[in-house]
Image (cartoon, grey):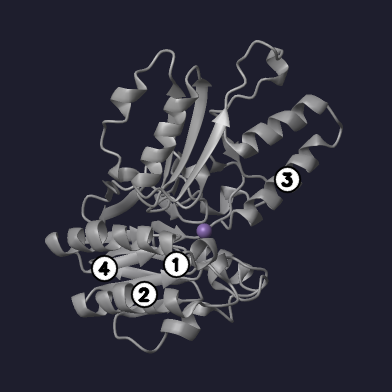
Amino acid sequence: MKLAILNDTHFGCRNDSKIFLDHTFKFFDEVFFPYLEENNIKTILHLGDMMDRRKFVNFNTLSRVRKDFVEKIEDLGIDFHCVIGNHDTYYKNTNELNSLRELFSDRYNHIHIYEHPVELDFDSFKIAMIPWMAKQNKEECLEFLKNTEASWVGGHFELDGYQVFRGIDFDGGMNDHFLSRFEEVMSGHFHIQSYRKNVHYIGTQYQLTFSDLGEKKGFWILDTETRTKEFVENPFSMFHQIEYDDVHDDITEFLKKDFSMYENAYVRILVHNKSNPYLLDKLMDTLYANGVQSVTVIEDVKTGDLSEDEQVDLSKDTLTLITNEVDTFEMERSSKIKEKIQTLYMEALTI
Ligand SMILES: [Mn+2]
């Protein structure tokens, strides 16, 4: 039997942006549901953070989610098993009041929402599904994990030492020892894919922030017979980077390429060498003519005027740059400061 795994769909992300909602449903309409229909897959596990906003729902977002996700699942006769993520809860210390219960519980035959840990059985393949562990249900979840017969786990875990952004390990969460006895643990919460020990952060299905630039996105199919997972890639990207160098590259030739992938997308242009400003303008014009959503131009600083220390490595993400900078201060409390910055940055990025 095959199960499709989803996590962190964050419906309504970026302040209920219509562009992001379209990007989200381009994946579901053109990649995810066609794959499930073609392969006759009738079960979905969702590892939490189905909705993005904790306190409110936007009716345009809700309407789209109801028609093109929830009712689509109902119509296809797919069983949908979803645990609560931290973004699905109204309060931070309890899962009791949550958007998924208010919006979707007890209204559909195939939609199953879990606020408490549960053991699911698929042809004798047992998997423990664990919701977000808040203060109020932490003991319950730990006790459940001690006693469950399941050898696989699906959840929404905040674990120390796992990558929250590429190259940045999370600090300030839980030690992973309570999961060590399991064959495999699949988790949502952190949005990039990473493996460590028996834990697999399976990554979001589509790009949500610029820190997802260049990250592989898609979803996983779990085969309960072979006990292995297979990745199905989402070919669509929201974030792009163009390296501009009119000294070494033929920009006129580049402009003849297909620009359709930039429609409604976010583009960052890194300018390495600019000898002809007209060509950069032409590139901008071409992007706008192709319906780009946002363009940011970053002029490179490799001019020779700056010392090596002052040069910024633009291939690194913002958080890495900030934490590296803190490291250079050589202060006693730098790890505490980095932790605070990391928390603030993640709040801002709506993990
Ligand atoms: Mn999330």
Q: Secondary structure at mark 3?
A: helix
Q: In the rendered structure, are the residues bearing label 3 and label 4 in contact, judged by CB atoms less than 8 Å apart?
A: no
Q: Sequence-wise, which precedes: disc 3 or disc 4?
A: 4
Q: Amino acid at mark 1?
A: Phe
Residue 34 x/y as whole percent: 18, 61
Name the kind of residue labelled 4 in the image. Answer: Thr
Q: Identify the residue at horizontal 57%, vertical 36% (top origin).
A: 317
Say which of 191 and 282 sits in front: 282
Quadrant of the rendered image containing residue 30: bottom left
Give the residue displayed 87% in from the left and 32% down from the top: 332
Going from N to C along the chain, the mark reached first, 4 or 1, is: 1
Task: Give the label on residue 43, or none.
Answer: 4
Q: Tell me the CA gap for discs 3 and 2.
A: 35 Å
| Mark identifier at residue 341 | 3
Q: Which residue lies under the disc numbered 2? A: 64
Q: Secondary structure at mark 1?
A: loop
Q: Are marks 4 and 1 in contact (CB under 8 Å)?
A: no
